[in-house]
Amino acid sequence: MPAELTTPQGTDPTRIHNIGYRSYDGPRLGRSYARRSLFSQSLRGAYGLGRSAKSKVLPMILFAVMCLVAAIIVAVAVAGPGMTDLPVKYTRYAIVMQAVIGLYLASQAPQSVSRDLRFKTVPLYFSRPIERVDYVLAKYAAMASALFVLTATPLVILYAGALLAEFDFADQTKAFAQGLVSVALLSVLFAGVGLVMAALTPRRGFGVAAVIAVLTISYGAVSTVQVIAWEQGSTGAVEWLGLFSPLTLIDGVQTAFLGATSAFPGGEGPSAGSGVVYLLAVLALIVGSYAVLMRRYRKVGL
């Protein structure tokens, strides 16, 4: 049998060891630093930066596709004889490339929030000097910024190409500014919708399917019903049907206020009067998305 470990009689077995711990007396960076760090990390993650090589493939391919199509349009404009304008308007580009934008959002919105839900890391965020409003704002701003980079970079390529082709500077600058306003509004709206769908489930696959369904099915259904209404002569109903899809909402706003040509049947988008309704609907969806996210994260992991 092993010998028992004993202490001499009359001695205290307790020991105090100095292992060199020192209290932290540096600066306390607080909530604002934590919020900025979470925003930066989420924005980088939306393009796979700081993650595995596999995570970079899809977002970088989609970004390259957005830029490549813009470069091809520029090449056509520069090489085409007698052209005085780009073949695709700045405000029209995001509508044309909606499939790429939707696929990007469907792949990255769940990555931004579903992983935190699935692996139950949200309480770790809240254990630091950060609150739910900071988490939601950082994730929302990061997703909107990532979408803006995706949609605005091709417009910069189009604008640079238009100037190289010596198109009218004033007209191109005005149209470019209108395009930037349009994609900024689209980025904020789509980020809210995508994050809400992704935050409803910790399963990334379900989140991807939900985002695709909301964006694709709603747009397909609205466009189909608009065509039917147009062919039956109900032209007045066409503009109001556009209120039921995120993409047609953006189409309506930029048609009414940004001088865009509508993708609605017949090219007849909403007037300035009904455009106010479209703008209010967009703002309501943005505010509603933020409110739903705040409500969702009141219960998560606690």
Image (cartoon, rainbow, N blue to C red):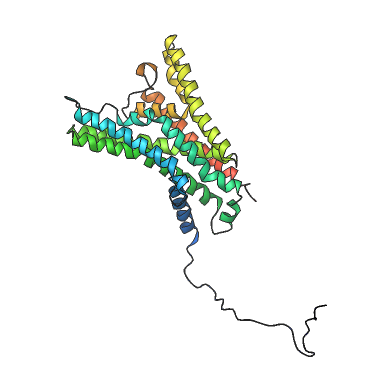
Q: Where is residue 140 in the image (x, y as percent from the top left)?
A: 48, 44
The answer to whether residue 288 is left or right of residue 146 is: right
State whether residue 10 is above or below residue 276: below
Is residue 153 in view from this perspective?
yes
Q: In the displayed image of the protein, which residue is found farthest to the top?
A: 232
Is residue 180 in view from this perspective?
no
> Picture quarter containing residue 185?
top left
Q: In the displayed image of the protein, which residue is found farthest to the front?
A: 1
Q: Where is residue 51 in the image (x, y as percent from the top left)?
A: 47, 50
Q: Which of 59 and 93 is in front in this view?
A: 59
**Which quarter of the figure is the N terminus placed in?**
bottom right
Number of callouts in the render? 0
State whether residue 149 is above or below residue 260: below
Q: In the displayed image of the protein, which residue is found farthest to the right?
A: 1
The answer to whether residue 164 is left or right of residue 288 is: left
Q: Position of residue 60 (x, y in %)?
A: 40, 42
Q: Nearer the viewer, residue 149 or 104?
A: 104
Q: Which residue is drawn at 53% across and 56% down?
A: 130
State whether residue 12 is above or below residue 64: below
Q: Residue at x 47, y 45 (%)?
A: 55
Q: Where is residue 176 in the image (x, y as percent from the top left)?
A: 28, 35
Q: Residue at x 46, y 55 (%)?
A: 37
State whether residue 85 is above or below residue 15: above
